[in-house]
Image: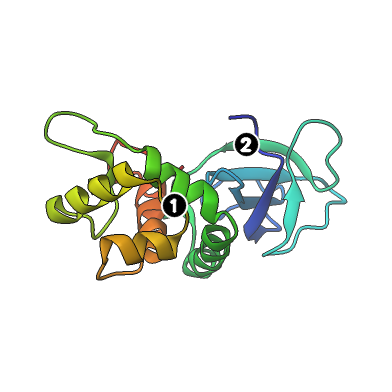
Amino acid sequence: MGKDEYANVLEYFPYGMSDSKDRRPSAILLTESLGLLLASIKKDGKVEVGKKVYIGEGKREDIHHIISRIPLSKVDEKGKELMNEILDKKIVEDEKKFVDVINRLGPINVKLHSLELIPGIGSKTLQRVISERVKSPFTSYDDINKRVELQFDIRRSIRERIISELNEVDKYRIFT
């Protein structure tokens, strides 16, 4: 996987983060690959919450440099609400990518399968998912819901798992 080219601004701090001694403008960004970054903003940078900004190689208009990766605990409630909206949109737009991940996930060890990390997938659902994808790979969220007869929305479960990974709740990552 290459470096991210763009990120969405979740929070903007014109005078730096409150818990930082650095008073330069900064922002918390959600990257295309679903990582959280703290970035320094250029003096003439035009950064707004919700705006997509370029963070790739080469000349950046708004971002001076990436300071560090940050945990989700540093994001305030408004930032988390915006992040949820962005995630919901991304999960719909990148359906093929997320369904492909579900088609490829395998066991972590003898007692744990990667699919069980997705909220709502227990041992019985795991067996149904595996047996159905052996017949033929899933093609969409609706295909998963129909063939496995899920009692929950797989999109919501994917979002919950992404948030769990951003919270660094456990050591396994499947979407971020």
Q: Which of 31 and 98 is in front in this view?
A: 98
Tell me the tag on residue 67.
Answer: 2
The answer to which image quadrant residue 145 occupies is: bottom left
User: SS for tag 2?
Assistant: strand
Residue ID at (50%, 69%): 81
Mark 2 is surrounded, within 10 Å at the Cα level, by few (under 14), some (14 to 19) or many (20 or more) other residues, namely few
Name which quarter of the figure residue 135 lies in.
top left
Q: Is mark 1 on a helix, strand or loop?
A: helix
Q: Which amino acid does label 1 sit on?
A: Leu
The earlier-in-sequence mark between 2 and 1 is: 2
Mark toward the viewer: 2 or 1:
1
- Residue 148 position, x and y percent, is 27, 60
Q: Which dot marks residue 72?
A: 1
Q: Which of 154 and 68 is in front in this view?
A: 154
Is residue 174 visible in the rendered structure shown here?
no
Q: Nearer the viewer, residue 142 or 13?
A: 142
Left or right: 26 in relation to 64: left
Looking at the rendered structure, the kind of residue marked 2 is Ile
Question: In this image, 170 relative to 25: left or right?
Answer: left
Q: Which residue is drawn at 53% across and 56% down?
A: 95
Residue found at the very far front of the displayed protein: 135
Looking at the figure, which quarter contains the N terminus? Answer: top right
Cα separation, mark 2 vs mark 1, equals 15 Å
Q: Which residue is drawn at 46% across and 42% down?
A: 176
Q: Which mark is residue 138?
A: none
Colour pattern of the rendering: rainbow
Residue 21: horizontal and vertical position, in percent?
A: 58, 44
Residue 172: percent from left, percent from top = 31, 37
- Do callouts 2 and 1 mark residues in contact (Cβ within 8 Å)? no
Number of callouts: 2
> In terms of image quadrants, where is residue 108?
top left
